[in-house]
Image (tube, helix red, strand yellow):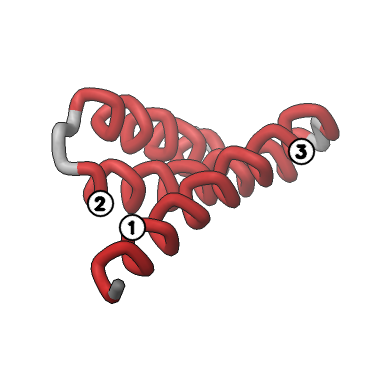
Amino acid sequence: MDIYKIIGAAGLLLISIGIVTKNRKIQDVLYIIGGLCLEAYSIYLGDVIFIILQIIFTLAAIYDVVKIQLKKTV
């Protein structure tokens, strides 16, 4: 099996686990790592739509982590 398919499958698994996780911070971390794995896979595939989708998804999860951190410091 190709290493990129394994990375993509890991990303899918991490995001799936994140969906059922109740802790918001852990959920976002799983989304970020899973999104980066799927980003690598989409770059490997060369699918521009999927590349853009994964960039937006990962940035949204990063934004949420930053927003949570800023709320804690206020």
Looking at the image, is mark 2 or mark 1 earlier in the sequence? 2
The residue lying toward the viewer, choosing from 18 and 71, is 71
Q: Is residue 3 visible?
A: no
Residue at (50, 36) in percent of width and height = 8
- Decide: few, some or many residues near mark 3? Use Cα within 10 Å; few <14, some 14-19, many ≥20: some
Question: Can you tell which quarter of the image residue 42 is in?
Answer: top right
Q: Is residue 38 left or right of residue 72?
A: right
Outermost residue, left direction?
22
Q: Is residue 71 visible?
A: yes
Residue at (42, 29) in percent of width and height = 12
Question: Can you tell which quarter of the image residue 47 is in?
Answer: top right
- Decide: few, some or many residues near mark 1? Use Cα within 10 Å; few <14, some 14-19, many ≥20: few
Expressed as whole percent of the image width and height from the top left, the position of residue 70 reads: 37, 68
Looking at the image, is mark 1 or mark 3 earlier in the sequence? 3
Residue position marked by numbered label 3 in the rendering: 52
Q: Which mark lies nearer to you, 2 or 3?
A: 2
Expressed as whole percent of the image width and height from the top left, the position of residue 63 reads: 51, 55
Outermost residue, front direction?
74
CA gap, disc 2 and disc 1: 8 Å
Residue position marked by numbered label 2 in the rendering: 25
Residue position marked by numbered label 1 in the rendering: 68
Is the C-beta separation of discs 2 and 1 under 8 Å? yes
- Decide: few, some or many residues near mark 2? Use Cα within 10 Å; few <14, some 14-19, many ≥20: some
Q: Is residue 63 above or below residue 3?
A: below
Amino acid type, mark 3 = Ile
Expressed as whole percent of the image width and height from the top left, the position of residue 26 reads: 22, 49
Q: Secondary structure at mark 2?
A: helix
Q: Secondary structure at mark 1?
A: helix
Q: Which mark is residue 50?
A: none
